[in-house]
Image: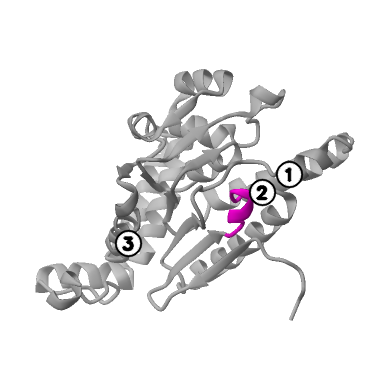
Amino acid sequence: MSDTPTYSRLAIDTRGVAWLTLDRPDVLNAFDDALIGELNGHLQHVREAAERDEIHLLVLGSEGKHFSAGADLGWMKRMVDYDLEDNLADSRQLAALMHGLDTLPCPTLCRVQGAAFGGAVGLAACCDIVIASEKARFCLSEVKIGLSPAVISPYVQRALGERQMRRYALTAEVIDASTAEALGLAHRVVEPDALDEAVDAMVETLLATSPQSSRATKALLAEVAREPDSAATRERTCQVIAELRVSDEGQEGLASFFDKRRPRWAPEPPSTTERSS
């Protein structure tokens, strides 16, 4: 067994749900190069498993009171002595993390409790769905210490819109949960004690969808966002729906709809006893 400490963990349940968890609660799940390296490795594993149809969706969360306080203080102290090339290499690893999470083929769900500062806002913005506790707080805090939310800016700006991004990236104001929901950074805000229940309910909702069509739809939406109205995009939309209609899952989905039965990928509904427990 390796003596190297680990700062995150990945578990895949029998339903094909991957649970990726930041596990540094003693330092508020702060980022450092070791954690970023671990997360990149986990995401590569999830990507490969999703492409083999072994994973339906990913849930990103963390242990403790806070989602992530941003950059680790020890890591920041080491950065003081980094030269330009060292800083470039370091930043490219973070960029790989954001890009890797954003482009995972399967749906992604982020569970946010407490503070989500700095790079943690980027993690949330890279996920398809964000469910946050009422106690969640988001902050692009970098300009307060002479830095910039540079690497995460494409993803956070996409979530907030350019106008709101300018405000919050330049002021480093704290965004409370209800404001995050209004801005589109969070999709749903719930009481702290209801957070896990809300996440589980969304997992069940996503599990009821076709894995193949979820991946195809996510990929298509990324293409549409890049070039919303072009002949190439219109042709691509036609190709996607035509290919899905003749695919095994498309045929199964249509057949189950007409037969008024559950499609084979959808989990069995819980019994009455399970619902009330």
Question: Which mark, by number, is residue 200?
Answer: 3
Q: Which marked residue is nearer to the observer: mark 3 or mark 1?
A: 3
The answer to whether residue 164 is seen in the rendering is: yes
Q: Nearer the viewer, residue 196 or 105?
A: 196
Badge count? 3
Q: Quadrant of residue 209?
A: bottom left
Q: Residue at x 44, y 51 (%)?
A: 110
Alpha carbons under labels 3 and 1: distance apart: 33 Å
Q: Is residue 169 above or below residue 129?
A: above
Q: Nearer the viewer, residue 21 or 85?
A: 21
Residue on which the image places disc 2? 96
The reply to whether the C-beta atoms of the residues labelled 3 and 2 are less than 8 Å apart is: no
Q: Position of residue 100 (x, y in %)?
A: 59, 52
Q: Residue at x 51, y 47 (%)?
A: 66
For the N terminus, which image quadrant? Answer: bottom right
Identify residue type, mark 1.
Arg
Q: Label 2 neighbourhood size at 10 Å, few (<14), some (14-19), many (20+)?
A: some
In the picture provided, is 99 more to the left or to the right than 267?
right
- Name the secondary structure under disc 3: helix
Q: Position of residue 141 (x, y in %)?
A: 60, 29
Q: Which residues are magenta?
A: 23-29
Q: Label 1 neighbourhood size at 10 Å, few (<14), some (14-19), many (20+)?
A: few
Q: Quadrant of residue 207?
A: bottom left
